Image (cartoon, helix red, strand yellow):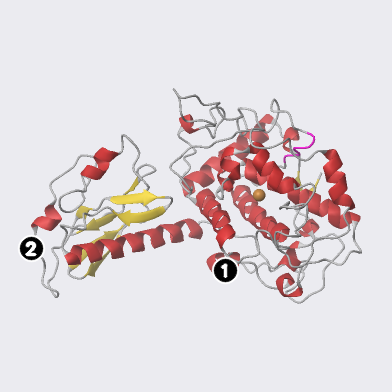
Amino acid sequence: MVEPGRRSLFKIAVGGVAVLASGGVAVPARATDRPEPAPDATPEPAPVHAGCFSETFKGRNLQICPHTPVVDDLMARGVFIDGVPLLIAVRHGTYTSALNLHTAHDSLKAAARDAVNRLQGAALELRRGRLDPPALDRPDLPGRRGGQRRRPGRAGYVRRNVATFTSAERADFVDALLTLKDQGVYDYLVDLSRRSFSSPWNAQTHAGFVPWHRALLLLLETQIQRLKPALALPYWDWGADKGLAGAPFTTDLLGGNGYAGTGDRPRAAEVTTGPFAARTGQWPITVREDSRGYLRREIGRAGPASSGPGQVNHFLGDTVYDRAPFDTTATTELEGWWGTPNAMHNRAHTWIGGTMTAASSANDPLFYLTHAYIDSLWADWQLRHPDVANALPADLLDTPLEPFKSELNWTITPRQLLNHGAWYTYT
Ligand SMILES: [Cu+2]
């Protein structure tokens, strides 16, 4: 859990209460020096820090400060118990009190557990609260039980190939992503996407794969447009743009391939160019499955080159959207699980490799450009096969997608997503 060089931070937690004074200097463990308070004792009044809320728990004064950032990828601050800052360990986005459980008072341990849970919940709420989904109360969108509209709706903007982005658009796109990262909104969506693999949201290995991801793209795109109203998500046509010399792998966009690591420099696959490289300090990977807190790419190492024009045409010629039982055994070749001949989407992930092969693959902004291209292929397929019955199960078609409904109160249904022209067009 603790990387070399980080252990000194944890030593501070040993022997009483874990404390970390401002500037990272350990101070005496004052909270445990005090006697165990009586259950109804009034805690010493502690000054409430800006942006924090204060309450009493089992005789202890708690201050919870959800605005406090994670100090680095292992430690967070944001809880004071009786005025003393609590050391909090962060592991894969989960907060845990680093209190020494053998020596701390029971009431202190309980207070720390409660406070850390509250902090994590408040921090999530804060990030979620900054995310504003696109409105659904539009007359041109089908209602929950309405019919699917074939004619174009109110397409507000155009999604273009990233290769056509001007230098000003590239700068705006990068700037918007970095701002959303700072706000925690980007990482909230990474976490949401990661949880889709272990949740019954019909987002993976299912007929709901494409509409669910269409909703996810709309969510990010709407946040980008709040910052840069003229921008739309670009797509990356990996069949046509397979070379790594141009967009999106330029240093003014997403940066290039990962570093071919050696034993001397073990951070293999670390992206070292562009605005999302770890060395910029702008793009720490905090939602993740292992200790590697940096963006990685291993293009071409794990699998063959991705789908080319021949495979795209094969997919567009397929007359079946999906086949029951809507799992990995027969899911559309667009998503591309085992047994499908082209495996377009999955192969794009594995072709890029590194971060893009993890459950938290949305950490790489390339995720959104890849999915925008998949989304455009779905739109092309729908145009090519307007008379093929849509294979989305009926109960899925009119059920608000999760977790967008329960977490964001955004009740978008697959039916409202079937016609991409109601939202945007592709060129
Ligand atoms: Cu994907």
**Residue placed furthest toward the top:** 264
- Residue tagged 2: 35
| 389 versus 348 height, above or below | below
Foreground: 310 or 132? 310
- Quarter of the rendering containing residue 21: top left
Where residue 69 appears, as percent x and y from the top left, is 37, 48
Q: Which residues are magenta?
A: 236-240
The image quarter containing residue 5 is top left
Mark 1 lies on a secondary structure that is: loop
Q: Nearer the viewer, mark 1 or mark 2?
A: 2
Q: Amino acid at mark 2?
A: Pro
- Tag 2: Cα neighbours inside 10 Å, few (<14), some, or many (≥20)? few
Q: Amino acid at mark 1?
A: Asn
* Viewer-side residue, 122 vs 297: 297
Label 2 beta carbon within 8 A of ligand 1: no
What residue do we see at 67% from left, 30% from top?
A: 167
Give the residue drawn at x 47%, y 44%. Answer: 182
Residue 2: % across, % down: 33, 42
Q: Provide residue 387's location: percent of width, then percent of height.
A: 92, 64
Q: Main secondary structure of the magenta part?
A: loop
Residue 351 visible in the shown view: yes
Identify the disc placed on residue 409: 1
Residue 48 visible in the snapshot: no
Q: Is residue 251 above or below residue 156?
A: above
